[in-house]
Amino acid sequence: MSPGFVMEDKVLILNSSDDLNYTLHPDNSSDGSNIITKCLVGVLLGLIIFFSITGNLLVCLAIYKDRGLRKLGNLFLVSLALADLFVASLVMTFAVANDLMNYWIFGSGFCDIWIAFDVMCCTASILNLCAVSLERFIHIKDPLRYSRWMTKRVVFGSICLIWLLSALLSFFPISLGWHKPRRLKLVSKERPMCTLELTPVYAVVSSSISFFVPCVVMIALYGRLYFYAKKHVKSILAVTKPSENKASHSSQHKSSHLIEHKASITVGIIVGVFLVCWVPFFSVNIIAAFCKSCISDLVWKSLTWLGYFNSALNPVIYSIFNAEFRNAFRKVLFYCSFNTPGSSCASCQLCCASLRQGKNSKEKTVVALQVNQLCNDIYRNEHGKVSEV
């Protein structure tokens, strides 16, 4: 579900399905085929939630543990991962229950909060992607002035501004009721369904601010970024051909630039996947504001979960197309601590066992040196670095 979709109060259907937020549904739980379908859909949606949570947690842990990824620009990726993590944990979990059970069991008050979190997290995700695009563009276009532009104050201030704007666009209008028209409230004894309603004005304004304007900015930035990337590659090739006597220096210079270009392409793929996931939904969002009956319930839910699926795709894209993140993921998943006696690594356990078998201090010192050398050899073979035991 997206920015711009809001909920009405509990009402009873009279003549039109356009005026409701809590709708009444017949109970089809006795249908065996329907139960099997719901089980299969529930498993699929559960897998999306699981991979979204674990994948985005993995991104945060990788950046936290890997010093090579502790860059100011990657803080935007952390903010993006947190937004996707909130979508999975605070939005998807309740959406599964709402869609599969066909009624809302968490109360009308919490429905407002749920919708507000939905709007806030989706808006934050879009704005973070826009910030990542801008950061990549500055890094490639003007690398000499990059550190002057991307200071800690600028990065942290931008992230705070992103989340503040997302909160103001979601909680503020929803709490004041600006997102919904005033309707007659009627009490219903049937089980309610928490759906999303919006006025045409709110749909157009909120969708434009939350999605369409940042989308245009990202497309423009990555179009320019692609142009500068091609220009840099041509200049690198022109420099490396005649200077064969400086092959090592040129190779390092070329490799550093190509790594940055590959990172930019990776983020571009992330933005492209994001557009594929969310453009159909936001297009339907605008259409539904003017003609609710034009969009079927199945299409609505399918496009909504297509947008949610983007939260699970970002970590996958990191691991496939970005070598730095791929190595960091491997370290997090198969981390072996060489500094603790209780290490889960089999080699370290043998080393620590040998260390404990020393009879006196001199023998323990000799064994400790052997353990240190052995662990360094193992770590050097696996990671190309030297550890300290």
Image (tube, helix red, strand yellow):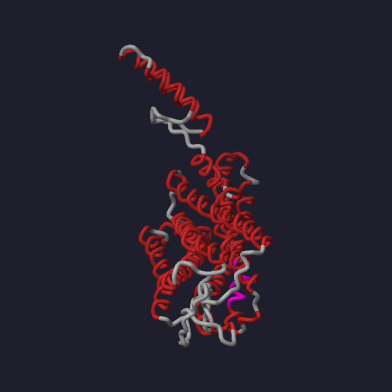
Asked if one can make out residue 142 in the rendered structure from this viewpoint, the answer is no
Q: Is residue 287 above or below residue 68?
A: below
Image coordinates of residue 343 in percent, x first then y, are 43, 30
* Left or right of 95, for residue 352: left
Front-most of residues 209 and 373:
209
Front-most of residues 230 and 54:
54
Q: Give the prevailing secondary structure in the magenta stretch.
A: helix
Q: Quadrant of residue 371?
A: top left
Front-most of residues 169 and 199:
199
Front-most of residues 26 and 238:
26
Image coordinates of residue 26 in percent, x first then y, are 60, 73
Image coordinates of residue 242 in percent, x first then y, are 64, 46
Quadrant location of the N terminus? bottom right
Q: Is residue 163 above or below residue 341?
A: below
Q: Is residue 246 above or below residue 165?
A: above
Q: Residue at x 49, y 48 (%)?
A: 58
Image coordinates of residue 174 in percent, x first then y, are 43, 77
Labels in figure, total? 0
Asked if one can make out residue 243 in the rendered structure from this viewpoint, the answer is yes
Magenta range: 278-285
Q: Residue at x 56, y 65 (%)?
A: 101
Q: Is residue 362 magenta?
A: no
